Amino acid sequence: MNIQIKNRNGKLQDRQRTYIQEKLAKLERYLDTIGDVHVDLAHHQQRGIGDVHIAQVTLHTAQGTILRAEESDPDLFAAVDALHDSLQRQITRYKDKHFRRGKIRRLDGEVVRASTNGSAPEVADTEDDTDAPQLVKTKSFAYKPMYSDEAIEQMELLGHSFFVFTDAETDLVNVVYRRRDGNYGLIVPEIT
């Protein structure tokens, strides 16, 4: 397991770093195919509560599945404990769906890294655009071809309302999304 810790608001103390690494290393008891683990920490003031630590973990498995959890607490150690508990529940749910029921599909092929140059395109400054929304974040991610039911499971594990994936049958980019009525929708491109 490769754990990378990033603190946005300053330096992390050695005992905090050690605690986070030891706590997250315990997750290997539940799932031994954990690859990279990215931990993002932030600290800010919240009205009525005071100082709040926000901890977010993104966990990548060898099968290409991504598990994500975010917790906040005035105490960093309590936030990390809550993250551990949340990820443990997600791992249990993931294992129930994939390994215990025999539903996992294995595809021949390797994980492909989506590449971008990592920078947002430049936006021309004009006086009329002062309130216009701007592109502020660009993400790149590793992905594998999958079926729509796998994409729905991945979307639910991440807690997102949509998920972009490459369909394993057609090799086209599709989007699965959660509808307001609680069901799911699938956007499939039509090549003309």
Image (tube, grey):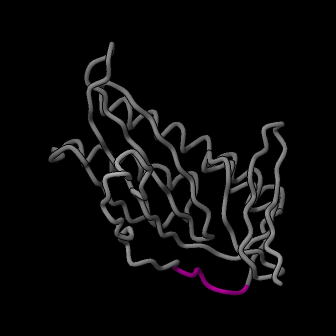
The secondary structure making up most of the magenta span is loop
Above or below, 58 against 190 in this view is: above
Q: Nearer the viewer, residue 78 or 174?
A: 174
Q: Position of residue 78 (x, y in %)?
A: 36, 29
Instruction: Decide which of 87, 52 is in the foreground and name it.
Output: 52
Seen in the image, is 96 located left or right of residue 52?
A: right
Location of the N terminus by quadrant is bottom left
Q: State the residue at coordinates (50%, 56%).
A: 28
Measured along the vertical axis of the image, is residue 26 above or below residue 148?
A: above
Q: Looking at this view, name the residue that lies furthest to the top.
A: 48
Residue occupying image coordinates x 57% and y 51%: 30
Residue 53: give x, y in percent of width and height: 31, 33
Q: Which range of residues does the magenta coloring cover?
A: 108-113
- Where residue 140 appears, x then y in whole percent? 48, 69
* Drawn side of residue 59 relative to residue 149, left or right: left
* Residue 110 belongs to the span the image colors magenta: yes
Q: Is residue 183 above or below residue 146?
A: above
Residue drawn at (71%, 74%), measured in percent from left and top? 173
User: Does 9 sit left or right of 40 as displayed?
Assistant: left
For residue 79, which quarter of the picture? top left
Q: Quadrant of the C terminus?
A: bottom right
x and y percent of residue 29 in the render?
A: 53, 52
* In magenta stretch: residue 181: no
**Residue at 25% over, 49% down:** 7
Give the number of callouts: 0
